[in-house]
Image: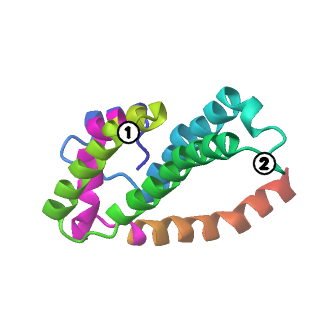
Amino acid sequence: MDMWYHFIKAVREHCPHALIVFVKYHLIASYNRNVIDETRQALRKNNQKIILNTKYIKTADKLEKLLEINKNFSLAYILRDKLKELFEYQNPIRLKNTSYKYINKLKDSSIKPLKKFAKKLDKYWYGIVRYAIPSTHTPILDRGNNKIKEIKKPLLVIMNWIT
């Protein structure tokens, strides 16, 4: 499921014995929104004078500043790839240990959106670790959802035709 608070609350309220598992897609989408986009916006805002007119770089100082800016942005992308790798673990204990290391790497960063995302992962790590439990994988659910969509499509056509 998604990490939205209201989804989690509803599952805990109505299905108290259910295991909550967060889907890779939602976690990566959240990272893209909360880290990549915010890092890009902050870099653009804080370094607009440096970024402008960079087609021909004439001074080493300007080049050094551009490389420093790029380093932060590159780090955000590299850490996104590391996040994707977490979902390849088949063992919950190894995933838990690797997740802690990953979260600490985010916390140690000087990039504010990474630190903010680390807090989110700290709060919801339980649903990420459960992804490594074989019986909680979502492909079966995804196939079921796709079947429901296939069934609904002709029904929606008929309903639109009738009304």
Give 7 or 88, whichever is nearer the viewer.
88
Lower position in the chain sequence, tag 1 or tag 2: 2
Q: Tell me if residue 69 comes above or below residue 94 in the rendering.
A: above
Q: Tell me: 159 left or right of 77.
A: right
Q: Tell me: 150 left or right of 98.
A: right
Give 90 or 116, whichever is nearer the viewer.
116
Q: How many marks?
A: 2
> Three-letter amino acid code at disc 1?
Ser
The quadrant in which residue 62 appears is: top right
x, y percentage for residue 117?
41, 37
Q: Tell me: 17 left or right of 38.
A: left
Give 29 or 102, whichever is nearer the viewer.
102
Report if the CB atoms under discs 1 and 2 are less than 8 Å apart: no
> Three-letter amino acid code at disc 2?
Ile
Is the stretch drawn in magenta largely helix, strand or loop? helix
The quadrant in which residue 15 appears is: top left
- Describe the colour scheme in one phrase: rainbow
Mark 1, secondary structure of its residue: loop
User: For mark 2, what is the residue?
Assistant: 57
User: For mark 1, what is the residue?
Assistant: 109
Residue at position x 37%, y 65% from top?
85
x, y percentage for residue 47?
68, 31
Residue at position x 36%, y 35% from top?
120
Residue at position x 17%, y 63% from top?
94
Spatial CA distance of label 1 from label 2 is 28 Å
Region in magenta: 119-139
x, y percentage for residue 46?
65, 27
Q: Is residue 129 visible to the viewer in this orientation of the structure?
A: yes
